[in-house]
Image (cartoon, rainbow, N blue to C red):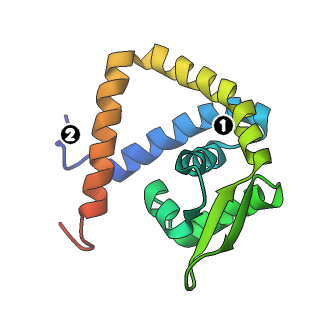
């Protein structure tokens, strides 16, 4: 049996993330969205108004350039608008069309979520999701070069 320090946390979590994202992507494709796009749209929707791109990037754990690339198709399709903020900052807002797209995608997301939770187990998922929030917080707090 391998020790806890021998199993790469990043690799293990990345494989799990890619696997679950594929399952959700297959469901969300019926609504014309990817898991990443759906997550971004929902994060903007929860804000009930324009959100600074820097805040959205921090919340969604995106590099800013990656977030801009992910927002490009959403803006092109009229699901979000991106406008100037204070200084060099920019804001993103959900459009009415974006809200309708979320409503179309929600049943597909719920189906994916139900399929996953029913197989994994509700209590196991609740425990793991709390641990994953803690993992994200720990990773954010780790300084560069920490051993």
**Mark 2, secondary structure of its residue:** loop
Determine which quarter of the picture holds residue 77. bottom right
Quadrant placement of the N terminus: top left
Residue 15 to residue 53: above or below: above
Compared with residue 120, is residue 130 higher up or lower down, i.e. above or below?
Answer: below
In 3D space, how far apart are the residues under numbered discs 1 and 2 (Cα atoms)? 33 Å
Residue at the bottom extreme, as displayed = 87
Tell me residue 49's x, y (percent): 60, 55
- Secondary structure, mark 1, is helix
- Residue 63: x and y, percent? 50, 68
- On screen, residue 42 versus residue 134, left or right, reads right
Residue at image position (46%, 20%) is: 117
Numbered badge on residue 79: none
- Above or below, 35 against 94 in this view is above
Residue 8 appears anywhere in the view:
no
Q: Single out the residue that lies furthest toward the right.
A: 77
Q: Of residues 32 and 89, which is closer to you in this image?
A: 89
How busy is the neighbourhood of tag 1: few (under 14 within 10 Å), some, or many (20 plus)? Answer: many
Would you say 9 lies left or right of 58 here? left
- Answer few, some or many: residues within 10 Å of disc 2's Cα (few below 14, many 20 plus, some between 14 and 19): few
- From the image, state whether disc 1 or disc 2 is nearer to you: 1
Q: Residue furthest front?
A: 49
- Residue pointed to by mark 2: 2
Quarter of the C terminus within the rendering = bottom left
- Which residue appears at 33% of the width and 41% of the height? 132
Rendering coords of residue 135 (x, y %): 29, 47
Q: Which mark is residue 25?
A: 1
Cβ–Cβ under 8 Å for marks 1 and 2 = no
Question: Which mark is first along the chain, 2 or 1?
Answer: 2
Q: Position of residue 69 (x, y in %)?
A: 67, 66
């Amino acid at each position: 049996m391998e020790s806890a320090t021998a199993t790469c946390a990043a690799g293990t979590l990345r494989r799990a993330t890619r696997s679950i994202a594929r399952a959700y992507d297959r469901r969300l494709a019926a609504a014309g969205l990817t898991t990443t796009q759906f997550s971004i749209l929902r994060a903007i929707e929860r804000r009930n108004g324009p959100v600074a791109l820097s805040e959205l990037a921090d919340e969604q754990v995106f590099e800013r350039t990656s977030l801009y690339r992910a927002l490009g198709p959403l803006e092109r399709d009229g699901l979000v608008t991106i406008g100037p903020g204070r200084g060099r900052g920019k804001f993103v807002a959900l459009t009415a069309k974006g809200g309708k797209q979320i409503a179309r995608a929600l049943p597909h997301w719920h189906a994916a979520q139900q399929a996953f939770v029913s197989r994994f187990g509700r209590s196991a998922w609740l425990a793991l999701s709390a641990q994953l929030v803690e993992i994200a917080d720990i990773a954010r707090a780790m300084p560069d070069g920490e051993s």
